[in-house]
Amino acid sequence: METEKEDRKTDRIEKEENKRIRKDKNEGIRKAKNEGIRKAKNESLEKEKKNGAVNRSVTAVILMAGSGKRMHTEEKKQFLPLCGKPLFCASVERFISWLRCEEVLLVVGAEDKETVEGYVQQEGWRKEKKISIVEGGAERFDSVAAALHFIEEKGKPENYVFIHDAARPFFTEDLLEHLYKELQYSKAVIPGIPVKDTIKVERDGIVEKSLDRKTLYAVQTPQVFDFQVLSRAFKSFLPRREEWKDKITDDAMIVEEFSKERIRLIAGEEENIKITVKEDLRFLKEKHKNFFPF
């Protein structure tokens, strides 16, 4: 009887070991494949640069100064765990792995600067890209304005600026490429997906009208701008911030209202959701780490 138990235990150990070996092998194949894809893309982009097709770099601005009150969690949503790391790491890693991106600005609350700097050092991101931490403001537009001021002070006004919410971890490099290439047609480009539900306008509990959903889109980030266009729009907006602060919900609205630039809308990605309320946490659990470059 004891011999049979020992045999079963040995078989179980061998099966677990074989399973671990297969997992490690598959992980190695996956990483090698992803590295090969990245290398091929990087070589293609380098050829574009040599041919003069690409002459403007990208500065990624990742917004993470919000308090995330709607989550009702002890941890701010940008620090919620995803694949063993804080949520915001997914966005940073995506931009770092994209060759066109030259610098990443992390716009954080004053109370989080030390924590975020710790993650930057821990992950070794500065070995791959320029990473800067900028203190944000009370409102989203205050944080973007702080990032624009930082970029201007560094003397990089010719860059394209990709403004992204740290709470949207599930965007792809394909989306970044699509946004970048659309900049040849417009100086302001945003992604969006068609609204599926019927939308009604309500006032005091009474429906006033229904909107034509064929013309409605749910807008996402990254939102992409020529630096000069966005900077000029913000400089026109900020003196009137008190008048407009309750109306402005994204960066494109400032360009819409305070510049003559027309916003170009492209197809977004269904999975590029924003983690906003507790119900959204299921997406963090369902997503496999293969989605990410780390």
Image (tube, helix red, strand yellow):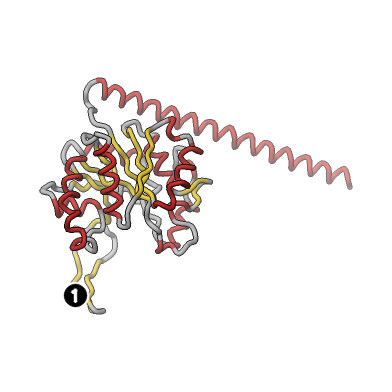
Compared across the picture, whether 270 is left or right of 161 comes to: right
Please, is residue 29 above or below residue 81 in the view? above
Q: Which of 178 and 166 lies nearest the eye of the viewer? A: 166
Compared across the picture, whether 258 is left or right of 65 comes to: left
Q: Residue drawn at (46%, 46%), measured in percent from left and top?
A: 114
Q: Position of residue 8 (x, y in %)?
A: 79, 44
Q: Residue drawn at (38%, 49%), measured in percent from left and top?
A: 108
Q: Secondary structure at mark 1?
A: strand
Name the residue that disc number 1 marks. 208
Q: Which of 80 and 11 lies nearest the eye of the viewer? A: 80
Q: Position of residue 80 (x, y in %)?
A: 48, 53
Q: Position of residue 167 (x, y in %)?
A: 39, 52
Specify few, some or many for label 1: CA neighbours under 10 Å numbering under 14, 14-19, or 20 or more: few
Compared across the picture, whether 13 is left or right of 84 comes to: right
Which residue is outermost to the top?
Answer: 50
Q: Residue drawn at (27%, 39%), measured in percent from left and top?
A: 151
Residue 76 visible: yes
Q: Residue drawn at (30%, 27%), measured in percent from left and top?
A: 45
Compared across the picture, whether 176 is left or right of 69 comes to: left
Residue 194 visible: no
Q: Which of 7 and 282 lies nearest the eye of the viewer? A: 282
**What is the quadrant of residue 97 in the picture?**
top left
Inspect the image, locate mark 1, and give the three-letter code of the amino acid beneath it. Answer: Glu
